Image: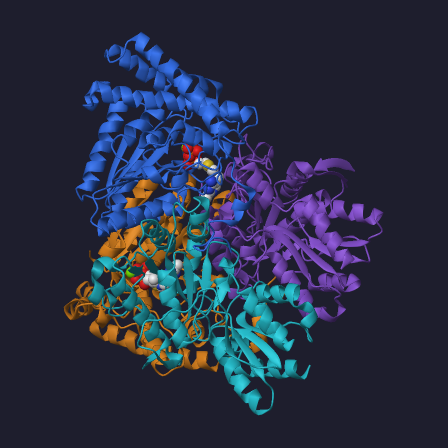
Chain colours: A cyan, B blue, C purple, D orange
């Protein structure tokens, strides 16, 4: 066991997979050379694996996605970094039209076994274009997987699984978690399933689903509530698309009271998909409306401190919503 | 240019001609199948066959990779896809190598012959081609990559992003623009502000060439050079190949609405295949009888291929839930 | 009154608005000249309004969106056509990063009062890239409106409202409806609200929400059911984003049995958003799970006839789902 | 080139210099505010001020429109945005004309001075600029459009799509690439395969120019010509302006990690402002005392502007639900 941050766990996963498989390549804006990414996630990789396998791409995200997909067709498990999840948008066409459909449109003759990493989420004073949760835009494209780790353990194991997967995986990393969470993780090789939600805490009174930074708030709140005698089941979605419907439905049934927490704007967010799975499959087990706690219906996170604070769901909001649901 | 200036043997030239002619005949058959409702779509390369085959002959489907676009039937056939394969695509058959009945007609792909699957969304193949080429480069493999798009489709950002990257990495790619004068109904002067799209190459630090796709030898030589340059590590070339679009944009279009009658007539009179046939005769590569024989035997082949393709099984409805993920369906 | 097809109604709306407002401009691939669009929606416009106001753009969708937005900033109510809703994907970055956020990020100093038209939907043997329902990709971007008309009346009135609106509007047109439906519509000028769902049929036993081609199936099925004594409330969503929550919740409450019908793939579709609005606001009024009838969880509509048939939700599927819900 | 070769009057040159110097001083203040935590971000144009002001002076904020990028503080100030305005942006104040506290610092915009709002997503302003220009053209208005991006950002598809359209319509736009050698840590040779990005112009049928942004007169004359050409209906020009990036990419970066110490040193020695000041003295446009006076008065202005900006109200939290739609919130 060794203590690592979320960021270090990701860096380590890439390193170990690059050692294991010569075909793995890493590229994106500023990921190579001495810089190793604007967050430092790919630090030391160019030094260890050389400039051919780890390199800076020019500043074009559509090309980054197409390049990765082409490499994938040739059998390379390529890892492309989008500098911010906001900047994956120029690549939407490549990802939806090519990457996601390659296997299906050739009945398996060609595939794109690649990983596209994207740091998402707000609360870093990054304003409109460094704070967004863009995962929802891709959620609804069979052929594609979208996952996000919300713990240090998962950061490493999930990324390893993504790299080894024969499916294209959008790997969302919460940028606020990079240095905010630390944990002891095994030294041995392990992976985390790409398609399974995780019950991170068992409970009997209410069930809360979340991921990313918000999950930290949920976990803290549930500890508090535990002291007040309220038992909270906490589910980390892990797979944002396709959803792990089975685990979701079971966890919702267990308590009959469901809260979904996301920092994204409510309408259109991943949580709508979760809610509708529950409403279709567990309706008669519910004792309360399916509540979604989300960001405001406003375009994006503003820069001014008080505006950002007003925009971002916070620890108190989460606690209040959980209490309210428990008391319902 | 004389055909023989290509430095190809008569045998090779005749083989090329056969693919050209077969493609034309096959395309005519596809239009028929469309008219009688057996396929719901056709988009054809009539007027581009000579250039396409000359282009494709500079590559080989063992080590090279081809990312075509929808008009590239002749080029795809040169890479090894058969008439029956293509017919299966148009008829939506299970064994269609392009997509197993999943994609529209003329969306080529053929793993056995290194032809990479094409989508309808134009120019996405350019970035994909850079990925294929980078794999060759990093894996120290000998091949080059050929990829094609239409001149209208060069307006896409992907055109630029791919060329830019290819220039940085000196990738072994030959990027081709088939300029047939129109993007559906939109003529060249509404598509771009230059008379010479190959002048874009310089801005990427790659080679630029312009060829007349109606001229077999000129086209072949240009592509041969570009392919060799790529394989020798010189980097990419952008080749603009002028061709004609003898037909409407597709079976959903009628070009008489937006093109002059005279322009269409003139183009038909200068049909590249007629011109090549004249050359074959003039240069004594084929006699008129031999030409006739080739046509007859192609007709028979197409007939047989059609029967064969029609007899092939349709995909089963349940296949819509297969090959979505590594593990199958959802 | 005059009988018009859905397509003619759209054409007429544009014509009338161009006559009313000199600033309205129309462009997109092949929309100008003699062709007037691949579906003929913009026929005769160039002849009447000239090549400066109606023109063919080069084949670049990101430019089309950026151009429209720039014109919008200058006060032009521009109408951009995306030839197929599948080909709006290269423009996602412009639309999300610029168009949708322009008003908010300048606190109203700059706005983009434009319309972006996109023909969507399947059943035309168009295969993967001429059949998709891409509206979901944009649903979740405050600042943007997404609407779709599902009747001839709305085709005209809704487009007029979109053109006059000061908000950017994505105007989705179901390509299968272009010539499939005809109706008498008023000769007088009228508009249809951009933000209101419509109860197109009142009923008391079940409530069905839909839009596009599927709504036709729902309406036909509900007639049949009416004969069998089952009374169906049918709601045309009209506004796909933001949803008209009030009308939706009311209509759901009315019967307590809700069916949502879309031809899109289920997870991630607009119907998830509708479901979650109902599950949050009308849960205790429900007598049945919120059922979503949708396309399969498969990447896109295939070409082969039997595959397309298997993929597309059809009249029988709709009828069956409605009967099942009524009998629940 | 001598400053006077610009054909500008001494008065105009001095006015230009004042903006240049003020920008530098203001930027230094912004770094301070960042270091003490009053703003959380700064991205600066140090090393580009001379070129930017020379560029902007060829336009006027009555009839022309400017779509800048984040390093364009000097150019934006030439268009009329004040130090206080910019400080309000960095401090996230309600009256910040760029975004009323909504966007990050250095995301310029100023309706009163025809400066159009900029987003962080690079190069989206290029297509927007074509829309502004087309409106001018169609509405028969006299102005031209100036838009700028960084050299790394030219790899975006939007760069290409916009230039392509501008070429077709002969739009009155001057497209600018500020080449400071790096995109964050990525040097020119990893960004594109050419030494001369202005060679891309020809492929779009527009004019291409390359200028040394450290040379005031050369830069001004090139832009003047391009602006006049645009306004005369000649169409667009692409101008590559070489500048330096004296600072790190932004306050989140440290360029010593990836740039040679010597390279940084040399650049600092050749600081464009020092060079211009030498010219001002050499050409007897200003005396050393006058230079000193200007600096002093700018220091005071910046001081006052900072106090003024800090005293301005913050936006209210409730504003996050305003200006979303025509009707206000959701
Ligand atoms: C991204 C995208 N936008 C629009 C279309 C619709 N479309 C199909 S072909 C075509 C014209 C292509 O013209 P060109 O590139 O000149 O090729 P040609 O058909 O003339 O060979 C258009 C607009 C598409 N397939 N993809
Ligand atoms: C579409 C997009 N991708 C990535 C980024 C992140 N990013 C911001 S600035 C920058 C480098 C820009 O380099 P260049 O264009 O040379 O401008 P410079 O900063 O050197 O002036 C990058 C990658 C972005 N803002 N937008
Ligand atoms: Mg063409
Ligand atoms: Mg730069």
Query: Which is nearer the eye, D106 or A152?
Result: A152
Q: Residue D68: percent from the left, percent from the top?
A: 39, 59
Left or right relative to B241: residue D196: left
Q: Residue D96: percent from the left, percent from the top?
A: 48, 71
Q: Residue A162: percent from the left, percent from the top?
A: 39, 63
Query: Which is nearer the eye, D115 or C5?
Result: C5
Left or right relative to B1: residue B308: right
Left or right relative to D213: residue A223: right
> In which quadrant is the N terminus of chain B drawn?
top left
Q: Is residue B213 visible?
A: no
Residue shown at 30% from the left, 56% from the top: A58
Report ligand 1 position as a quadrant: top left
Q: Residue B40: percent from the left, percent from the top?
A: 54, 31
| Relative to A251, residue C34 above or below | above
Residue shown at 67% from the left, 70% from the top: C280
Query: Which is nearer the eye, C41 or D123?
Result: C41
| Relative to B67, residue C253 above or below | below
């Amino acid at each position: 066991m060794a203590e690592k941050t979320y960021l270090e766990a990701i860096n380590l996963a890439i390193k170990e997979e690059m050692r294991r498989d010569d075909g793995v390549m890493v590229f994106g804006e500023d990921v190579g050379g001495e810089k190793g990414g604007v967050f430092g996630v790919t630090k030391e990789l160019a030094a260890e694996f050389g400039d051919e396998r780890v390199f800076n791409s020019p500043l074009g995200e559509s090309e980054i996605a197409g390049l990765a997909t082409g490499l994938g067709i040739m059998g390379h498990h390529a890892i492309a970094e989008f500098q911010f999840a906001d900047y994956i948008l120029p690549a939407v066409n490549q990802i939806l039209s090519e990457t996601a459909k390659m296997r299906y449109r050739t009945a398996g003759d060609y595939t794109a076994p690649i990983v596209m990493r994207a740091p998402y989420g707000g609360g870093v004073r990054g304003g409109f274009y460094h704070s967004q949760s863009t995962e929802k835009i891709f959620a609804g494209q069979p052929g594609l997987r979208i996952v996000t780790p919300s713990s240090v353990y998962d950061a490493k194991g999930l990324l390893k699984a993504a790299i080894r997967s024969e499916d294209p995986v959008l790997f969302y990393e919460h940028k606020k978690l990079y240095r905010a969470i630390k944990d002891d993780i095994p030294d041995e090789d392990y992976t985390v399933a790409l398609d399974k939600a995780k019950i991170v805490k068992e409970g009997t009174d209410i069930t809360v689903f979340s991921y990313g930074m918000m999950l930290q708030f949920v976990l803290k709140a549930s500890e508090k509530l535990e002291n007040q005698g309220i038992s909270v089941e906490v589910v980390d979605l892990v797979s944002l698309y396709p959803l792990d419907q089975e685990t979701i439905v079971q966890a919702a049934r267990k308590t009959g009271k469901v809260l979904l927490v996301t920092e994204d704007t409510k309408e259109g967010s991943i949580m709508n998909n979760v809610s509708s799975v529950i409403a279709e499959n567990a309706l008669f087990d519910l004792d309360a409306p399916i509540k979604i706690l989300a960001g405001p219906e406003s375009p994006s996170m503003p820069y001014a401190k008080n505006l950002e604070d007003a925009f971002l769901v916070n620890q108190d909001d989460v606690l209040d919503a959980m209490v309210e649901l428990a008391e319902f | 240019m004389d055909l023989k200036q290509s430095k190809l043997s008569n045998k090779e030239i005749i083989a090329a001609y056969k693919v050209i002619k077969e493609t034309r005949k096959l395309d005519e058959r596809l239009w028929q199948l469309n008219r009688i409702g057996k396929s719901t779509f056709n988009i054809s390369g009539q007027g581009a066959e000579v250039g396409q085959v000359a282009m494709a002959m500079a590559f080989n489907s063992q080590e090279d990779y081809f990312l075509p676009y929808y008009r590239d039937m002749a080029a795809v056939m040169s890479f090894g896809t058969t008439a029956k394969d293509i017919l299966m695509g148009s008829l939506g058959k299970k064994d269609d190598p392009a997509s197993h009945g999943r994609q529209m007609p003329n969306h080529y792909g053929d793993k056995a012959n290194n032809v990479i699957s094409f989508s309808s969304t134009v120019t996405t193949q350019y970035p994909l081609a850079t990925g294929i080429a980078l794999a060759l480069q990093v894996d120290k493999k000998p091949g080059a990559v050929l990829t094609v798009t239409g001149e209208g489709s060069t307006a896409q950002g992907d055109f630029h992003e791919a060329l830019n990257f290819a220039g940085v990495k000196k990738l072994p790619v030959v990027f081709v623009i088939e300029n047939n004068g129109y993007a559906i109904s939109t003529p060249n002067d509404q598509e771009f502000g230059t008379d010479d799209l190959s002048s874009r190459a310089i801005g990427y630090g790659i080679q630029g060439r312009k060829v007349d796709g109606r001229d077999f030898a000129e086209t072949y030589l240009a592509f041969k050079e570009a392919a060799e340059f790529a394989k020798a590590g010189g980097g990419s070339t952008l080749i603009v190949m002028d061709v004609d679009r003898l037909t409407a944009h597709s079976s959903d279009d009628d070009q008489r609405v937006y093109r002059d009658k005279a322009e269409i007539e003139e183009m038909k009179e200068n049909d590249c295949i007629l011109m090549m046939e004249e050359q074959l005769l003039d240069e004594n590569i084929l006699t008129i009888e031999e030409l006739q024989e080739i046509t007859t035997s192609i007709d028979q082949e197409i007939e047989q291929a059609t029967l064969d393709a029609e007899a092939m099984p349709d995909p089963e409805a349940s296949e819509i839930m297969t090959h979505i993920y590594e593990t199958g369906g959802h």
